[in-house]
Every structure is written in C-alpha cells, then in structure tokens.
C-alpha cells in the first residue's frame, strides 16, 4: 500500500506513536500513527492489505444480534443515544427542501434507518458486510445492499441525503466515497459525515490510548480542517458542525480509560465471565460513561469534542 497523504499527496510524515490493537486484540502486530508534514492529517502506517484488514474486524463487529432481555435493554439504550443522529439528519433534510431517499453508508444492522423510517423518511442502506445488510433488512425492515459506495446500484442524482457515520476513517481512499456521494446526491442534497475528531482534548491528554485512533482499524485521523479541505475539494460546502454525540463521546472516553470494560470488546474477545461478573463489569462501565459526561460535554462546548458531525451541501458548479 502506498503511503502518500490522500488529502495533499505529500509523502513526508512525522511519527506520533507506535501501537497495536488495544481494544479487540485481533493482532499483536505493531503499527505507527504518523502525521502528514504538509497538511497534518493522521494516518496509519504501514497500511494493512485488504485481506489483513479483514482479520482486524471481528466477526460481530458491525452489529449485534441477541434476543435476551439484556439485549432488549441494550436496544432501548441504543435508540435513546441515536436520537441526536436522527435529529441532525432530520434537520438537514428539512432545511434542504430536497426530496428523495436518505442513503446510510455503513448502515450496520440498520437501527438508525429504522428510526428514520419511523419518522416518515424513505431510506436505503449500504454495508461492506453481507450479514449486516441482511440484518438491516430482516430485523429492521430497511432495504440494504452489500457493496462499496462507488459500485452501489443507485442512479446518479437520486438521493436527498447521504450519511456516513464513522466510515471515512476506515477507508483506504476516503475521497472516492465523497466523490461517489456527490454523484448520488440531487442538487442541494446534503452529506452528513461523522468521524472521530483528532483535535479533541482526549487525544491531547490520552495520546495513543484515545479510542478514536483505534489502531489498526482506523486508517486515517481527521481534524476539522482536514475534513473541511477534503469535502471542499470533493464539491461540498460546509454548513454545520457538531462536536458532541450522545452515543459516541461519553462511551468513547469510558472505553479509552478502561478498554477491558467495554461491552463490545468483552464480547469480541470472548471474555469468560459468569453472570455476576458480567453484571458488575456492565455496571462499572455504565458508571464510567456517566462520569465521562461532564468532561466530554465541556470539551464539546469548547469545540474540541471527541467526534465531529458535519452537514455539507452539494455545491452546484
Ligand atoms: Zn497531507
């Protein structure tokens, strides 16, 4: 894999730190996180090959499918914390006054699409994972396809909005997705993107322990200006930026501080836990998420939250 900067084409980088898969332990291989000397965008090096990268995504990474009482509670929680994603998209589409479906790229199990559908939106989903697309359809009744965005079977100029939550940082070439989204959007249509914010306080304080770097699954790290530049060069005009997400910011700090308590990491690492250990760890993690709330709210209020969600408008030439 070449390691030129996809934002500015520079080939000169500066080493920030060396790390391995701290969260899911899928590999013991070490990677470097480097910063582009010209534009400062972060990237992982060496970039894993596609077959290598696949092994870094645990089988149940994209969605969870359980029917226990605990997972029903989990769904209630996930719906609750997804509400600000839904509201953000709802406002973007309403203000655009463009009609057409909303396409969620990287839709996972489709809960977000279902919530949009419940509010009267036409939706479509897209995911790398066949199983995720299947779950989105069978469980959440969201029409979903397994494909990459540039090969997705949708006609150009057909979408009112394209959403990509935590997608760009996983791609070898984020620009191809932005360009493909540009082609799919109707004039004035909206692109909504969320990525970890590499300019957040958590990264400054925790460095390699910040879960937003997520070695080796995150191939790039964006600061707000990196995202602005890339969007602008792909034909988008920035309209709105938000630094707080109920789903991602407090839980992200909790996971950074105690990765071994993260419920998903425990599931993926198949930690051997009896029911009481499991309950204690869940409660501890929940307490940590609550304790993380004031700090994550403060950093977001100072425009240095650990995620960035943006609304951008397709520019018409
Ligand atoms: Zn660069």
Image (cartoon, rainbow, N blue to C red):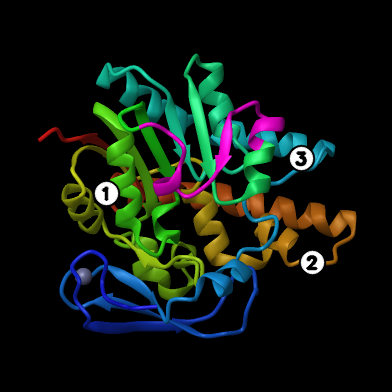
Residue 52 drawn above or below residue 290: below
Horizontal and vertical percent position of residue 303: 27, 49
278 left or right of 107? right
Label 1 element class: loop
The quadrant in which residue 263 appears is bottom right
Which residue in the protein does label 1 denote? 303
Which quadrant holds residue 236? top left
Q: Position of residue 6 (x, y in %)?
A: 27, 66
Segment tinted magenta in the rendering: 136-155
Residue 207 falls inside the magenta stretch: no
Sequence-wise, the earlier of marks 2 and 3 is 3
Query: Label 1 CB, ligand 1: below 8 Å?
Result: no
Residue at image point 49% right, 64% down: 211
Which of disc 2 and disc 1 is earlier in sequence? 2
Q: Is-magenta flag for residue 138?
A: yes
Separation of disc 2 and disc 3 at Cα?
17 Å
> Could you say which disc has been placed on residue 71 in the image?
3
Look at the image and tell me whether residue 107 can be seen: no
* Disc 3 element: helix
What number is the disc on residue 271?
A: 2
Q: How far apart in space, not on screen, are marks 3 and 1 (Cα)?
A: 34 Å
From the top left corner, tell me how far across and down residue 1 is, in percent. 40, 78
């Amino acid at each position: 894999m070449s390691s030129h900067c996809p934002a500015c084409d520079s080939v000169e980088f500066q080493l920030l730190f060396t790390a391995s898969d701290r969260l899911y332990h899928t590999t013991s291989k070490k990677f470097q996180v480097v910063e582009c000397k010209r534009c400062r965008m972060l990237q992982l090096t060496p970039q894993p090959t596609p077959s290598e990268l696949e092994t870094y995504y645990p089988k149940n990474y994209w969605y969870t499918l359980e029917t226990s009482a605990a997972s029903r509670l989990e769904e209630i929680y996930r719906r609750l914390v997804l509400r600000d994603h839904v509201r953000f998209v709802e406002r973007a589409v309403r203000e655009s006054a463009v009609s057409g479906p909303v396409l969620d790229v990287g839709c996972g199990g489709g809960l977000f699409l279902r919530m949009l559908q419940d509010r009267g939106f036409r939706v479509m989903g897209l995911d790398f994972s066949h199983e995720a697309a299947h779950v989105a359809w069978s469980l959440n009744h969201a029409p979903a396809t397994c494909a990459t965005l540039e090969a997705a079977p949708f006609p150009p100029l057909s979408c009112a909005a394209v959403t990509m939550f935590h997608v760009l940082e996983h791609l070898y070439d984020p620009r191809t997705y932005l360009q493909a989204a540009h082609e799919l959007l109707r004039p004035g249509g909206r692109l909504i993107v969320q990525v970890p914010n590499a300019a957040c306080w958590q990264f400054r304080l925790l460095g390699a322990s910040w879960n937003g770097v997520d070695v080796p699954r995150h191939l790039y790290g964006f600061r707000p200006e990196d995202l602005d530049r890339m969007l602008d060069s792909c034909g988008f005009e920035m309209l709105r930026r938000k630094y707080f997400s109920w789903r991602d910011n407090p839980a992200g700090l909790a996971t950074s501080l105690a990765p071994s308590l993260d419920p998903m990491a425990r599931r993926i690492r198949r930690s051997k836990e009896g029911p009481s250990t499991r309950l204690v760890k869940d409660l501890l993690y929940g307490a940590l998420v609550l304790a993380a709330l004031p700090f994550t709210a403060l950093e977001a209020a100072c425009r240095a939250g650990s995620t960035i969600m943006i609304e951008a408008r397709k520019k018409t030439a």
